[in-house]
Amino acid sequence: MENDLLYQIALSKIQNIGPVHAKNLVEKFGSAKAIFQAPQHQLEKLEGIGLLRAQGIKSIKNFEESEKEIAFIEKFQVTPLFYSSGDYPSNLRNCYDPPVLLYFKGNISLNDYYFVGIVGTRSNTDYGKYITRYIIEGLAKENIVVVSGLARGIDAIAHQTALDLNLPTIGVLAHGLDTIYPAHHHQLARQMINNGGLITEFPSTTMAEKHHFPNRNRIVAGLSDVLIVIETGIKGGSMITAELAFQYNRDVFAVPGRLTDKHSAGCHHLIWQNKASVFTTIENFLQDMGWATIKQNQVVQPGLFLNLTEEEKKIFDLIREKQPIHIDELRYHSKLVNSKLSSVLLQLEIKAAIVAQPGSRYSCL
């Protein structure tokens, strides 16, 4: 494992090899080590790699930086999550630009819950604070993890409310795990590690620089099953996160406010653009997400009684294990081509074994 991790860290640090190229390389070669062992001429011929990137890969002979990072990981009991690992968040793997390597300090699985992203302005109003608490309290009986960016304002309120209700919460960082930004969130971060965790794509010693925050926002969007925007102006990190969530085909909700309130202008804009649904009540939200229906029917296991083909049974078992599961993850695990997978899903729906959920996700009836 340590030997593999050495190459995984090195791959994540190569200049000109971004998340999309790294993901494609891993899918092509199967492991980070195999990428470094591949001949340069083979790398050069790959789409999107070319001479410059191939030279960048082959130029790495000294893995001293990776060794230092491994020492940090071991000392502080950080969990590295590589793109091809079974523990890697499946929601992120389904994105087109997932981080090839994540660093996680926490105590929960990143695949066994509904991940609810909650974002908003750093300068929230009392209404924003109240609504954030209202929503999280209303979802407290669901199997959720609250995801946000550990920023001031709505982010911090969301994290703290989750902790107050003994709900796990994940903070996505724009820097390494050896620091906390903003600094006055140290105590909050320590509590989160014991009930949820902190996650980042940045190695230790990486500081919170301005250009890192959009990267952080994409992880919040990609990790979440649904994103709820509480209060935001027309511009800012919350709007970037909402746009990314929309591009990732995530469900996006926005909380409306007064028409003249600048803190709600971004929420109204998202709704006007049809990029977000209006958040009205907890009951309506659960209905829109299909979670209430899922919970009512989880006791039924039609797969035990239906006459399923081998392929149908394979897909049904995947859905039952990971529900609600995105169609991209079904394709990844089943290895079926699009047309065949669509046909199998249709047959399962006809047999009333599964139900299609918003956002191209499927659950068992």
Image: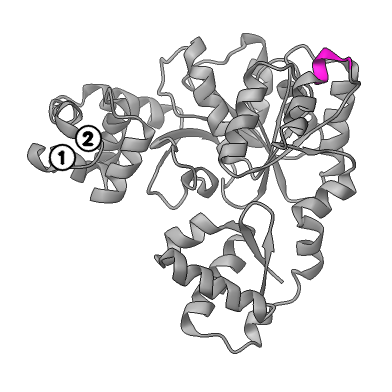
Q: Residue at x 60, y 44 (%)?
A: 249
- Secondary element under disc 1, as helix, strand or loop, is helix
- The answer to which image quadrant residue 65 occupies is top left
Depth check, front residue: 260 or 26: 260
Could you tell me the amino acid type at mark 2?
Ile
Label 2–label 1 contact, CB within 8 A: yes
**Which image quarter is the N terminus in?**
top left
Depth check, front residue: 191 or 84: 84
* Residue of label 2: 49
**Which image quarter is the C terminus in?**
bottom right
Q: On the rendered structure, is 286 left or right of 169?
A: right
Camera sees residue 189 = no
- The answer to which image quadrant residue 187 occupies is top right
Camera sees residue 118 = yes
Tally of numbered discs: 2
Q: Residue at x 54, y 30 (%)?
A: 218
Q: Which residues are magenta?
A: 260-264
Q: On the rendered structure, is 76 left or right of 166?
A: left
Report the colour scheme: one colour
> Residue 271 in magenta?
no
Q: Is residue 291 above or below residue 341?
A: above
Could you tell me the amino acid type at mark 1?
Leu
